[in-house]
Image (cartoon, helix red, strand yellow):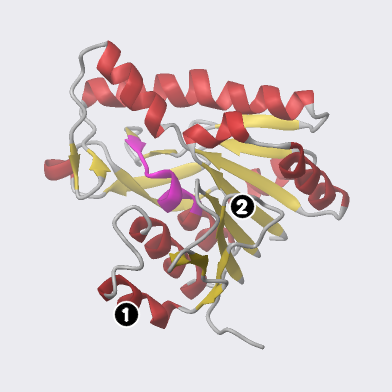
Amino acid sequence: MNLIIVKIGGNAISKLNSDFFEQLRQWRQAGKKVLLIHGGGPQISKLSAKLNIPTVKKNGIRVTDEETLSLTKMVLLGNTQPALLMRLAHEGLAAIGLNASDQQLLTGTYVDQAKYGAVGSITGVNELALSKILSGQIGVLAPLALTRDGEWLNVNADTAAADVARVLKASQLYLLTDVPGVLKNGKVISAMIPQDLPQLIEDKVITDGMQPKLSAAVEAVHAGVHAVCITDQLTHPGTTLKMEVTD
């Protein structure tokens, strides 16, 4: 599929600038399909605190009990997704909000139900339905999946974006974050290959916050995604991860 996937964190939605929307416009004009996968972690934590629902994380993963799952769906589908759709509409970009219940777009399985609750990973994508939807508009997809039994799963947005990119063999995957890329001594590492990661982790160049993004990126390029870019702006390449770095 001639597809570009962009993962946007919950905090980033309100900070998207005109360059971001212009890049989406150019991709669409060039005939590329565009899928935005949005997070909502900060908003989920904020609402949890207001409702006195404890936030528990293990290994950086939000433990998702029944109450937290309901709240997560509420935030993603009732807050962050509509906010992003409104921004796209304001910019004159045709877009549609999507979730796992739309034609079983995303199916998944539990990561470790006993340890994390309803946290999942994506095992299947309804490629035919998604391709048809993305032919005429930008898709805005929540990182939620459904099991074969119809149970909802909370999926980390970076992981969801990489999983979907892997299954659909996307040409490019952008992971938008709040830093311009992977930083070493204050400077962005412009290009990386998967083999670089162990040493960078050992040297503490890549710390806990960036490790999940890079783990997801590595899985994506191993599965055939041409390039994964970690950046704070679509118009700046940031750190590009490929199987091989060429001069």
Q: SS at mark 1?
A: helix
Locate residue 35 relative to residue 80 in the image: left or right. right
Residue 103 in the image, given as x and y percentages of width and height: 56, 35
Verify whether residue 56 appears in magenta: no
Q: Position of residue 91 (x, y in %)?
A: 80, 29
Question: Residue 187 or 89: which is nearer the viewer?
Answer: 187
Q: Which residue is mark 2?
A: 5
Q: Is residue 142 above or below residue 86?
A: below
Q: Is residue 150 above or below residue 183?
A: above
Circle number at residue 84: none
Q: Which residues are magenta?
A: 153-161
Magenta stretch encompasses residue 159: yes
Disc nearer the start of the sequence (2/1): 2
Other-residue count near label 1 (Cα within 10 Å), few / some / many at <14 / 14–19 / ≥20: few
177 or 39: nearer the viewer: 177
Numbered disc 2: secondary structure: strand
Amino acid marked by disc 2 = Ile
Within the image, what quadrant is residue 224 found in? bottom right
Instruction: Report how far apart the C-alphas of labels 2 and 1 lie in the structure.
Output: 28 Å
**In this image, 65 relative to 210: left or right?**
left
State the image coordinates of residue 218 (x, y, percent, origin top left).
43, 69
- Residue depicted at 64% across the width and 50% down the height: 233
Q: Position of residue 39 (x, y in %)?
A: 46, 37
> Image quadrant of residue 236?
bottom right
Q: Which residue is mark 1?
A: 199
The furthest residue to the left: 114
Quadrant occupied by the N terminus: bottom right
Label 1 is placed on what type of residue? Gln
| Quadrant for the C terminus in the image | bottom right
- Say which residue appears at 47% left-offset and 43% top-offset: 106
Residue at 60 percent of width and 69 percent of height = 227
